[in-house]
């Protein structure tokens, strides 16, 4: 995986070996790829063209599908407030499973981000 990502122009994060980043100095766009076993999530600060270009190049090297906008990754729920430029990440569903298994407790309340 590392060889493929480096060949695509990504650099590997020194503090987390599962994170790669691509910085376009001209447009200042940043694309981050989070890799965990056989799961990959691409995110971008701006520049959807660059994001899509890099994803297409990645998919040409690896057999995979583009599932569109990320709403879940590694048991984390991801939602967006584009107007206010915010991303919310939670592990609510995972926590429900853990509590149910460990304590036999069910959570019925919904998510609350406020």
Image (cartoon, rainbow, N blue to C red):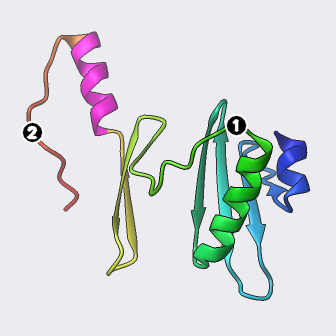
Q: Which mark is residue 108?
A: none
User: Viewer-proximal residue, 90 or 3?
Assistant: 3
Q: Quadrant of the C terminus?
A: bottom left
Q: For mark 1, what is the residue? A: 63
- What crowding class fits label 2: few (fewer than 14 Cα within 10 Å), some (14-19), or many (20 or more)? few
**Nearer-N-terminus badge (2/1):** 1
* Lateral position of residue 98 relative to residue 62, left or right: left
Per the rendered image, the range of residues in magenta is 92-102
Q: Quadrant of residue 42?
A: bottom right
Relative height, residue 8 to residue 64 (above, below): below
Relative height, residue 32 to residue 110 (above, below): below
Relative height, residue 87 to residue 26 (above, below): above
- What crowding class fits label 1: few (fewer than 14 Cα within 10 Å), some (14-19), or many (20 or more)? few
Question: Is disc 2 placed on a helix, strand or loop?
Answer: loop
Q: Quadrant of the N terminus?
A: top right
**Does the magenta-highlighted stretch encompass residue 106?**
no
Q: For mark 2, what is the residue? A: 109
Give the x, y percent position of residue 77. Answer: 36, 45
User: Viewer-proximal residue, 63 or 96?
Assistant: 63
Q: Main secondary structure of the magenta part?
A: helix
Q: Quadrant of residue 20?
A: bottom right
């Amino acid at each position: 995986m590392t060889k493929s990502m480096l060949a695509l122009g990504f650099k590997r994060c020194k503090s987390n070996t599962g994170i790669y980043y691509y910085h376009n100095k001209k447009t200042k766009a940043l694309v981050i790829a989070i890799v965990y076993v056989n799961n990959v999530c691409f995110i971008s600060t701006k520049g959807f063209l660059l994001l899509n270009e890099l994803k297409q190049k990645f998919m040409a090297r690896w057999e995979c599908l583009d599932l569109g906008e990320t709403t879940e990754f590694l048991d984390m729920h991801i939602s967006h407030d584009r107007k206010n430029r915010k991303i919310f990440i939670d592990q609510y569903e995972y926590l429900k499973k853990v509590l149910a298994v460990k304590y036999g407790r069910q959570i019925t309340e919904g998510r609350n981000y406020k």
